[in-house]
Amino acid sequence: MYAQVMVFLPFRTHATPVLDYDIPPALAQAIRPGLLVVVPLREQCLPGLVLALTETPAVPETRPIHSVLYPEPALDARLLELARWMAQETLAPLHRCVQVMLPPGLRTSVCLRLTPLVTSAPPDLPGPAKALLEALIQRGPLTSAQTKQALKGVDLRRARYDLKRRGFIKVERLLQLATVQPKILRLARLIAPRAEWDARLHGLRDLTLYCHILEFLEAERQPVDVSVLYAETGARSGHLKTLATRSLIAFSHEEVLRDPLAEMIFTPDQPPTLISEQQTAWDVIEASLHDATSTPAPVLLLGVTGSGKTELYLRATAQTLAQGKQALILVPEISLTPQTVQRFAVRFPGQVGLWHSAMSDGERFDTWRRVRSGAVQVVVGARSALFAPFPNLGLIVMDEEEDASYKEGRPPYYHTREVAEQLARMTGALLILGSATPSLEAYSRALAGRYRLVEMPQRVMGHQQRIAAWEDYLHLPGSRYRPLETPQAATIALPPVQIVDMRAELKAGNRSIFSTALQEAVDRALAQQEQVILFLNRRGTATYVFCRDCGWTAECPRCDTPLTYHEGASLLLCHRCGHQRRMPRQCPECHSPRVRAFGLGTEGLEAQVREHWPGARLVRWDQDVARSHAAHTAIMGRFARGEADILVGTQMVARGLDIPKVTVVGIVSADTALNLPDFRAAERAFQLLAQVAGRSGRGLLGGRVILQTYYPMHYAIQRAAVHDYVGFAQRELAFRRQAVYPPVIRLARLVYAHANREKAQAAAESLAAILRDALRNAGLPLTDLIGPAPAFFARVRGRYRWQILLRSVAPADFLREISIPAGWLVDIDPVEVL
């Protein structure tokens, strides 16, 4: 037999070779598809993945496989099949699709290598680039981790860009072999009775310390981690070795799972009684779970915020576990993970695993192994959890399915919804897509019968016993809940939304960013010790800086976009590439001191809130203050515990927050996304506004939403104000049919970037000509091609970007027949075209 091996080359390439290798007799029983192996290629030994076995090689002479990296397959047959499907659908190279599925710890790293004849650093090099070049001259090729260690405080991104642009270095990408291993603890235990201690300790110095060690082990009555023993007794390794030599203690080893949930305590709860509307929805889901004849159709669960979608997820998970299968719960944002994990861990204690990018390699490696062995029955995670090695998957839940973060932003450009649907077909699992504002793609599929549409228009807020406890805690004579036909349950209407026309506010003389209605609502909430959320989907203090005399604007030198002012650090930042500079004291063009910051971001909003309500406790939640999973959890926990009165935030506050004391949500500017040149702008704006509005009135106190806008008659704002998703969808689908945009037809986006403006334009025009010829030959209208044109963000990180949009019922099939030149990024079904 021979093995077809995908060889991971130590440099960036458009295609990774699949070569045939001889299977040596010593490895005949071990080699199978999905196994990671080491194979010879030219003068190197490189890692590779066995794709298939064959009896006939493609070439007459083959070389033998060198060795096996792991005894168990890294990818099973199902994941290999899924990778091939992804490569077909996204037009990404197969190795790109395989790499996103590989176990944690096996990753691509960057290696910097000097080009030939470079022996010294030119004097005109910038400081960071010079420091990096000198390090490479002295030490030879360096990985990105090594350069960070050697050149702390140096802007390595900029240095790398400068050196690569001038041809001094090559940037190679290497596949590092996995360094993550199971965590093994070394344990010590007492093996000699106290009566024998004196005799065995005879002649030793530090008798007091040795006795202390033995007494500590005696008191513990079980093996103790040696690191704990060192900390508690002051012992060192030599002391323990001496005790072991004298047969007083013995060592053992034990594997410890790195589980981020291990230290948390969850008290199990019982499922509540469903109201009739929930029961109807559950009957559909339950029937799909027990459909043994074929793969059940995906279910689109369209439920308003607070309608009880999560309870149905929990019941579906319980049914799946009862069938001996596993469940995958997908959430779009890392910030949503804590509350989702809490709900599932309480219902299924000891059976839930966590999966997201903020976990350490060790934690993900242990979760990966536990999922593969079946020890973890429920996984809650982000989109990459799709590729966990489930041996018996029965349920996939995709919460907030419309979220744009479900689309991968790097090759392969896969959408979680499409991959989840294919995975469900392959495994026979039920796919549940849940949202209060589903994507138009999912909704149109439900209308067409491809998905089963289940609607829940009522907000179910709690059960009577819990409500009575909250009323007593808050000293309320009663609440706004209405009893339902189920005696235990009650509901409350979705919060009223007041649209404030900011043009009228200006005419009335109010130049504040807070309308009169919003000020009064916040004043009332604070006076009654309630909580407030203020939403603005822009970061920073001001959105741009300009000179009031000559009109100069501070722009990123690499992206041609305005720099955002952050007052706390007194810096101007580019949110596209990370470039930063100090706030200028005078205009660099006319030297006028009248340089001003204009616009508003969350940092500026925070400052104005402190000025307007100085006695309020305030917390801000955006990417600038919450860059880690722990930071997200801390901010959410602080606000949920009532340690802050006002929460200022970006879209992070729009989802997952269920805080009973939030009675006011202020949308400071509803117009941020409305006027972007993207056909999804209205859909994205409606979804965000509706989700933010749903954070209010989720408790006994009710709530209200103040929506400030300069476009009060826009249909996205009008429909969001009355929580009317169906009305918005009908209007927006009519626009998409008229303009011939998804979901009426599919779309492909092709983007080319180059440091030279003319070369970028020439490449775009050349490919556009090829595509027009292909459209003519296929008898398709030339209007199916949009462009070429500069992208909205026309220059990013020093590279000019041109794009082409292609309409097609099957864009991947159409483009597969065309030889697309190297350097083009192809995104099938893009979620944005900026």
Image (cartoon, rainbow, N blue to C red):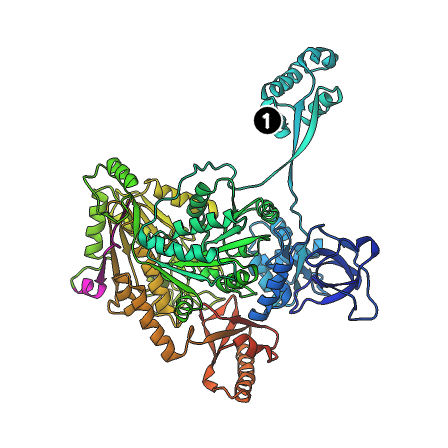
Q: Secondary structure at mark 1?
A: helix
Q: Is residue 25 above or below residue 321?
A: below
Write down the region rendered in magenta.
489-507
- Image quarter hosting the C terminus: bottom left
Q: In the shown orientation, is residue 541 left or right of residue 810?
A: left
User: Type of residue at label 1?
Assistant: Ala
Q: Is residue 319 above or below residue 403?
A: above
| x then y, percent, for residue 713 | 24, 69
Farthest front residue in view: 293
Question: Closer to the camera, 219 or 153?
Answer: 219
Q: Is residue 731 above or below residue 533?
A: below
Q: Residue at x 38, y 78 (%)?
A: 737
Q: In the shown orientation, is residue 797 left or right of residue 539?
A: right
- Image quarter hosting the N terminus: bottom right
Q: Is residue 106 in view?
A: yes
**Which residue is labeled 1 in the image?**
231
The verdict on residue 493 being magenta is: yes
